[in-house]
Image: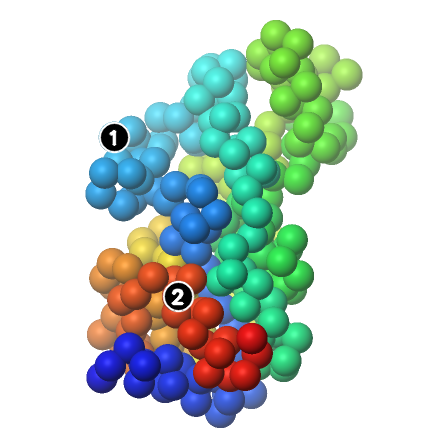
Amino acid sequence: MTAKDEIQNLARLLRESDHTLALTGAGISTASGIPDFRSRGSGRWEKVDPAQVCSVQAFRRDPAAFWNYNLEWWLACLRAEPNPAHHVLARLQQEGLLLGVITQNIDGLHVRAGSRTWEVHGHLRTCRCLGCGRQHPFDFVSEQFQAGKNPPRCPCGDLLRPDVVLFGDMLGEDFQAATQVLAGCQLLVVVGSSLQVYPVAALPRFARQLVIVNRDPTPWDDKAVLVLRDDIVRVFEELAATLGLS
């Protein structure tokens, strides 16, 4: 099957499905300048154990080191802009071809592109106090860093943590909502996810049909009706043209 045939097949599957969702991972945001986690030579977790730097235990052990390691790339996420793949997914929703996006990403780019989004690993719009529970805009943390204050603290004096799911955290309400919206899913389009982090990696089991758009193999490839190993932005730009959306 040629690349053009694959795109046409994906377009057909989208038209034929009445209950379609997308599941996205870090690979969709690399074109926005955000490195993914496991790519050889550039993955964020290639040379470091995430449990040592981005976990509940790491935060409790040394909150200043935790923030010092993670803040720079989180701020890079906040500076990034949605790329064409994010925008095409939002357009598919507008056209009634997609119910929304379930994402592992914390960068907020699907929300900014206009998609209905279930952010199962949280987001970077806010942080919260471990003492009084008050939420603050994430800028509150960077302002403290600029003032030389680390670890950042709430005005009540207690520590702040980001509203993201750290290693060792339980998943929150968005994950439960995602499992509910997947009930009866006819087509799940997985985009830029290695499908290696559980429990999100088990979500494809809810879908009747599965399409995977990812550069590298995933554990679910043999169960997919279509696997596209191509540049994600190119796939979605060509999909939009095929569907007459561009």
The residue sitting at 50% across, 26% down in the picture is 72
Q: Earlier in the sequence, mark 1 or mark 2?
A: 1
The residue sitting at 32% across, 81% down in the picture is 4
The residue sitting at 72% across, 33% down in the picture is 137
Q: Which residue is label 2 attached to?
A: 234
Q: Is residue 201 above or below residue 62?
A: below
Q: Which residue is label 1 attached to?
A: 47
Mark 2 crowd level (few <14, some 14–19, many ≥20, 10 Å Cα): few
In this rendering, does residue 12 appear at all?
yes
Q: Position of residue 25 (x, y in %)?
A: 43, 55
Mark 1 crowd level (few <14, some 14–19, many ≥20, 10 Å Cα): few
Along the viewing direction, whichever of 175 and 115 lies nearer the viewer? 115
Foreground: disc 1 or disc 2? 2
Name of the residue lying farthest toward the top: 148
Left/right placement of residue 1 relative to residue 105 reads left
The residue sitting at 50% across, 76% down in the picture is 240
Amino acid carrying label 2: it is Arg
Identify the image quadrant of the C terminus.
bottom right
Q: Position of residue 204 (x, y in %)?
A: 39, 70
Q: Is residue 104 above or below residue 203?
A: above
Identify the image quadrant of the N terminus.
bottom left
Say which mark, if any, is on residue 94: none
Label 2 residue SS: helix
